[in-house]
Amino acid sequence: MMQWYSKGKKSVINPKHFAPKDLNFVKLGVMVFVKRVYGWMRAAANKVVIEKSEGVVGALNFFTTKDGLAVFHSYFGAPAAVGLAEALIAGGIKKLVIFGEAGAINPKISIGELLIPTFAIREEGASYHYLPPGVVAKPSQKLRGRVKTLLNKAGFPYEEGGVWTTDAPLRETRDKILRCSSQGAFAVEMECSALFSVAQYRRVKSAALLLITDELHGRVWKPAYDDQKVINNERKIAEILTKNWLELL
């Protein structure tokens, strides 16, 4: 990984080749990874002016509203999410909010609760092409603060802490869970460190909200993707973001 980062500023393939041509009016892009979340946000949106299946690299579907919100249903994983982020940034989007799911690796947070990441442990490959190994992947402090203010106004509770991003969810071993938890990570997922790194490199703002859908810190894995608390809270957050997104600008 030490050799992956290049100081060269000019890529052979420019992200502008993949930039969407008709989204220059967008003020905030929201990236989601779960189909039901995208559906809830689409249902809560007003004045939709563009709605497409694919058409933007890395996105399964997306819609935009007349006043400048765009929601993208991304593929899972850092490489796909980074490709989408690069295309959106090249198309002029300066603020990205990631709304995803994560597994708790620390008992300080439980199934159905919300985590606002403050940093990400970089255990995926994409970020090392954007930042040197010693740089910490972090969200924008300003945008993260606005996300917190929005949630506070809505009365929705959350925890703050680190997140562990991995490319190998089926190799989340007990020793790594304990190690990452001891470093301040509350949860594990697959995209945040890469997306924070791209945003830092491209000098745009990013922040994330992660709903806890399973627990890995106990003696056995505890999945709860379809738990009613998970579904209800995920839907509430989707609606809060969609109806009040202007407060994040």
Image (spheres, helix red, strand yellow):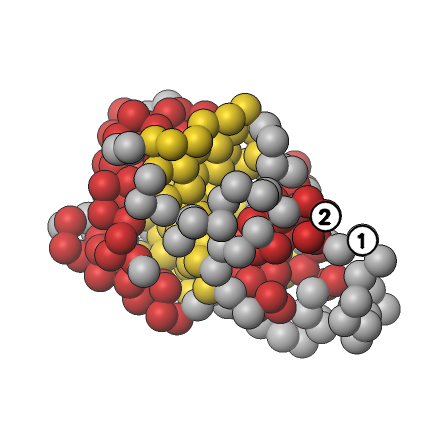
Res. 21 in view: yes
Q: Which residue, given by chain and number where applicable, does mark 2 sit on?
A: 17
Q: Which mark is residue 35?
A: none
Residue plotted at (37% across, 25% down): 39
Name the quadrant of the N terminus: bottom right
In depth, the one of 241 and 164 nearer the eye is 241
Element type at mark 2: helix
Above/below status of 27 relative to 45: below
Compared with 12, 105 (above or below) is: above
Q: Nearer the viewer, residue 244 or 114?
A: 244
Q: Position of residue 56 (x, y in %)?
A: 60, 36
The quarter of the displayed image where residue 51 is located: top left
Q: Amino acid at mark 1?
A: Ile
* Badge 1 vs badge 2, beta-carbon distance below 8 Å: yes
Task: Please determine whether, in this image, residue 134 is positioned above or below residue 66.
Answer: below
Rendered-image quadrant of the C terminus = bottom left
Name the element at disc 1: loop
Distance, label 1 to label 2, CA atoms, is 8 Å
Q: Quadrant of residue 168?
A: top right
Q: Amino acid at mark 2?
A: His
Q: Which residue is mark 1?
A: 13
224 and 243: which one is in front? 243
